[in-house]
Amino acid sequence: MIITIDGPAGSGKSTVAEAISKKLGFIHFNSGTLYRAVCCYLLDVGFDVENIKFDTKIKKFNISVNYNGNRQIVLVNNKDYSAHLRDNNISALSASVSVNKIVRDTIDNCQRKFSKTHNMVVDGRDIGSHVFPNADFKFYLDCSIKERARRRFKEEKSKGNKITLKEIEKQISSRDEIDKNKTYAPLVVPKNAEIIDCTKLSVDETVNLMLSKIKR
């Protein structure tokens, strides 16, 4: 079974997907982690990530996903970039990486291959619309920009990172524009997806609402 959760940056997709996967005993497949790992790899080998949209000089690379318990481990050309995936600059730069078709095709193929042997809850920005259009259950998790920024600010502050709420709100707004205006697999509400606005919902409330709509 495949359950997809699409939505804009910072809407809580990964948190909700992880909770649902634990409840159902499924694999939580975080597609954003793959893009962050590839971003780290491309920086590592010297690419100008901010201007990579139409760069065809990217050579084929191998990407694989393993699990250590519930922890998703992504290897790019057999190198683990896990220590840097949550760096704030990587999260921002991965938006630029995600619009490159070579990168997207490689990651899409990785996800589809993995789905052939696992029950999955997958979250991302084009999962139900592009990667798995025939998923068993599809959700679109929405949330206001101000609330998404507030949540991200709280997370960054807990890590001791110095960034203002206004800066985060600007980053999220910019990411939304990039995601919605991609020429290839933009962020949209997938066909037949349940739209859930979690602006005023807790994680538990959101999870329970989604689970009530999943028939096993």
Image (spheres, rainbow, N blue to C red):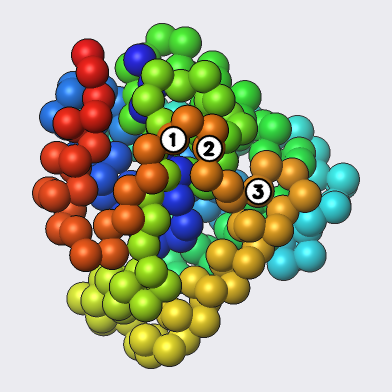
Q: State the residue in front, 169 or 27.
A: 169
Q: Position of residue 52 (x, y in %)?
A: 78, 58
Which quadrant holds the C terminus? top left
- Residue at the image point whose x is 53% and y is 74% from the top: 173
Q: Which of disc 1 and disc 3 is earlier in sequence?
A: 3
Residue 119: image location, x then y, percent: 33, 17
Q: Is residue 157 above or below residue 108?
A: below
| Residue tagged 2 | 190
Q: CA distance from mark 2 to mark 3?
A: 11 Å
Q: CA distance from mark 3 to mark 1?
A: 16 Å
Residue occupied by mark 1: 193
Q: Is residue 56 in view from this perspective? A: yes
For residue 194, which quarter of the picture? top left
Name the residue carrying label 3. Answer: 186
In this view, which residue lies farthest toward the top? 117
Question: Horizontally, is 120 left or right of 128 in the view?
Answer: left
Q: Residue 71 location in percent, x, y? A: 27, 38
Q: Residue 212: where, in percent of width, then height?
A: 17, 31
Residues at circles 1 and 2 in contact by the CB criterion of under 8 Å: yes
Residue drawn at (44%, 35%) of the image: 193
Residue type at the position of mark 2? Pro
The disc label shown at residue 52, or none: none
